[in-house]
């Protein structure tokens, strides 16, 4: 069953900017879905429309079969949203922010308090419940936005750049909690600039660029289609000559650092063997680029270069829209 | 419509009203006290010091005559200020989005903000009335008319404040109407004088001022005298409330000032 369907969504701002050019999107119930795209691609506009914060120009949105135009209350009751920008009354204490949000969803105060305590404890905010919003750090505010979005227990949670500006520790703990929510049946739609985040958390993705969905895919399939990966190798000793290795493209960064592009079908151990034949010993290696990031850049570049929807060399697991 | 839905609406309304009431109560020094102090000064200066030299008006001591207008002036100012300030702040800091993403219908949002304005207006109205009792004995001619007119007036100006907030793009925009429209209309609305005192055409011009009708209807409720027939006052206020409510709901439906 589809948790969310967007059909031919268009948005033209009063300035004349066409932010969405007929977006079609379908997210299955229980999915962990990434919506990726460069800045200004239309991600936030799309999320704004889905969550009733932006008026659409044309198109249709359905959430669990309820139409946003005909049954807006049914749709909103099923959605939780964590926006990109902080949107709090800075003078209210943490607990009141969450209880008020529950109230707007029709949850009586006593029940709202119980739920608020549950989610604030889950997100390590209970000890701060009497703290005014303006006294919270950015990371704590981000976590509070998640607690606030969950207090009515939505079936679909939409997060717009939820970990922007938070430190690694908080980001990891938020990932852990989002996985737990998804495991318990909440459909999650995520936009992020951290492609590592999408690769780590999500099962499906859609890439939006210039107001149109340019690709949708299962992330696992997509990664299988990766044509090459680039590694940075730290070498023991100095490199005097760049060897020619079949299946690998080598580039010397400096005397002891080598960048190697490994084509699909060739293994890392094969690379090591080939290098050892030349007496080159590898001390350590790292991925030059997140794998999804590479694919993402390939796709965005590819779609910028060509207007055709069927191009030789297109990954088979990816559906170009 | 199911019972569950009405219950949800009630909880959302209750939440909004409680939030609004707590907002003005938390900052009572900014919200409740100034009007009470200002009105006390009016009672002292215009009522006691100058009023005794002015003599009776419409058959009442001048202090008694100005009490209804001063109470209503405080109600008008505070009902308007509460909604314009609260709703604009929620726009400015984007926490209006907490409501927009929720299933709370527009009419509940409007009712919640207006009720907040009415509560502050009535709270200040009660405060000013209690101060008035220190200066004069207050006899209420008609409790029904007094309460109804004060309630309708607070609703009307809360709606006005809401519309102002929807269109406001800066904090300057929320002070322009109170300063340049509301205050002059209130002072010229028969708070301090009977329009019978105005020469020639000016008493007719005064009839264009809607606040005149409210002040006089309220004065009728307290003192039993009015320059204006009551039915006209009630009809005018009722029609204004209906028009402003429809206009406000239309603004919310279209997302004017709050949605892109």
Image (cartoon, coloured by chain):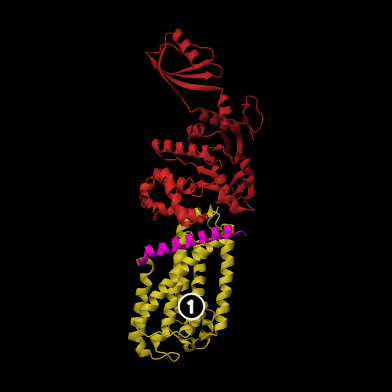
Chain colours: A red, B yellow
Residue A246 pos. (x, y %): 53, 12
Q: Main secondary structure of the magenta part?
A: helix
Residue drawn at x 58%, y 63% is: B249
Residue B164 seen in the current view: no
Give the secondary structure at mark 1. Answer: helix
Residue drawn at x 58%, y 36% is: A206
Q: Which residue is mark 1?
A: B147
**A21 relative to B136 in the view: left or right:** right
Counting every numbered tag in the picture gives: 1
Q: Quadrant of the C terminus of chain A?
A: top right
Residue A111 seen in the current view: yes
Residue A99 pos. (x, y %): 45, 54
Magenta segment: B1-28
Does the magenta segment cover residue A232? no
Q: Foreground residue, B146 or A114?
A: A114
Residue B8 pos. (x, y %): 54, 58
Quadrant of residue B40 within the rendered picture = bottom left
Q: Chain of mark 1?
A: B
Q: Is residue B254 above or below residue A146?
A: below
Q: Residues within 10 Å of mark 1 (few under 14, many from 20)?
A: some
Q: Is residue A138 above or below residue B94?
A: above
Residue drawn at x 42%, y 54% is: A96
**A135 relative to A26 in the view: left or right:** left
Does the magenta segment cover residue B24? yes
Residue A37 pos. (x, y %): 54, 37
Q: Is residue B156 above or below residue A66?
A: below
Q: Quadrant of the N terminus of chain A?
A: top right
Q: Is residue B239 above or below residue A228?
A: below
């Amino acid at each position: 069953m589809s948790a969310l369907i967007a059909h031919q969504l268009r948005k033209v701002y009063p300035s004349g900017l066409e932010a969405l050019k007929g977006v079609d999107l379908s997210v299955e119930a229980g999915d962990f879905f990434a919506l990726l795209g460069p800045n200004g691609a239309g991600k936030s506009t799309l999320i704004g429309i889905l969550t009733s914060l932006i008026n659409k120009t044309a198109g249709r949105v359905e959430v669990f079969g309820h139409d946003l135009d005909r049954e807006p209350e049914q749709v909103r009751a099923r959605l939780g949203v964590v926006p990109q920008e902080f949107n709090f009354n800075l003078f209210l204490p943490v607990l009141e922010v969450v209880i008020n949000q529950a109230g707007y969803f029709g949850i009586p105060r006593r029940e709202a308090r119980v739920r608020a305590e549950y989610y604030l404890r889950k997100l390590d905010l209970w000890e701060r419940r009497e703290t005014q919003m303006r006294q919270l750090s950015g990371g704590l505010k981000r976590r509070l936005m998640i607690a606030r979005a969950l207090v009515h227990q939505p079936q679909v949670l939409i997060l717009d750049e939820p970990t922007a500006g938070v430190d690694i520790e908080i980001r990891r703990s938020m990932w852990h909690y989002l996985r737990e929510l998804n495991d318990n049946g909440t459909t999650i739609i995520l936009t992020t600039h951290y492609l590592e985040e999408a690769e780590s958390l999500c099962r499906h993705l859609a890439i939006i660029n210039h107001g149109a969905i340019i690709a949708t895919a299962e992330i696992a399939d997509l990664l299988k289609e990766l044509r090459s990966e680039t590694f940075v190798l730290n070498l023991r000793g100095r490199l005097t000559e760049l060897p020619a290795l079949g299946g690998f493209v080598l580039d010397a960064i400096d005397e002891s650092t080598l960048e190697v592009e490994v084509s699909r079908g060739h293994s890392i151990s094969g690379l090591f063997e080939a290098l050892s034949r030349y007496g080159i010993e590898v001390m350590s290696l790292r991925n030059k680029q997140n794998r999804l990031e590479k694919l993402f850049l390939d796709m965005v570049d590819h779609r910028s270069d060509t207007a055709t929807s069927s191009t030789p060399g297109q990954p088979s697991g990816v559906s170009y829209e | 419509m199911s019972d569950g839905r009405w219950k949800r609406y009630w909880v959302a309304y209750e939440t909004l009203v409680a939030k609004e009431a707590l907002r003005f109560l938390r900052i009572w020094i900014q919200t409740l006290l100034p009007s009470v102090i200002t009105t006390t000064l009016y009672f002292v200066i215009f009522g006691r010091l100058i009023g005794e030299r002015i003599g009776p008006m419409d058959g009442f001591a001048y202090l008694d005559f100005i009490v209804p207008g001063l109470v209503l002036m405080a109600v008008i100012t505070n009902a308007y200020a509460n909604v314009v300030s609260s709703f604009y702040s929620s726009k400015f800091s984007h926490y209006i989005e907490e409501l927009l993403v929720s299933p709370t219908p527009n009419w509940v949002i409007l009712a919640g903000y207006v009720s907040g304005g009415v509560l502050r207006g009535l709270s200040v109205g009660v405060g000013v009335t209690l101060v008035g009792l220190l200066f004069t004995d207050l006899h209420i001619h008609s409790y029904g008319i007094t309460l109804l007119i004060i309630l309708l007036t607070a609703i009307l100006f809360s709606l006005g404040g809401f519309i102002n907030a929807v269109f406001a793009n800066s904090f300057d925009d929320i002070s322009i109407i109170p300063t340049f429209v509301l205050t002059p209309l209130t002072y010229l609305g028969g708070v301090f004088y009977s329009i019978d005192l105005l020469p020639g055409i000016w008493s007719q011009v005064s009839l264009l001022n809607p606040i005149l009708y409210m002040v006089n209807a309220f004065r009728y409720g307290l003192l039993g005298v009015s320059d204006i027939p009551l039915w006209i006052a009630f009809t005018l206020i009722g029609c204004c409330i209906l028009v402003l409510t429809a206009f406000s709901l239309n603004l919310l439906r279209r997302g004017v000032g709050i949605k892109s």
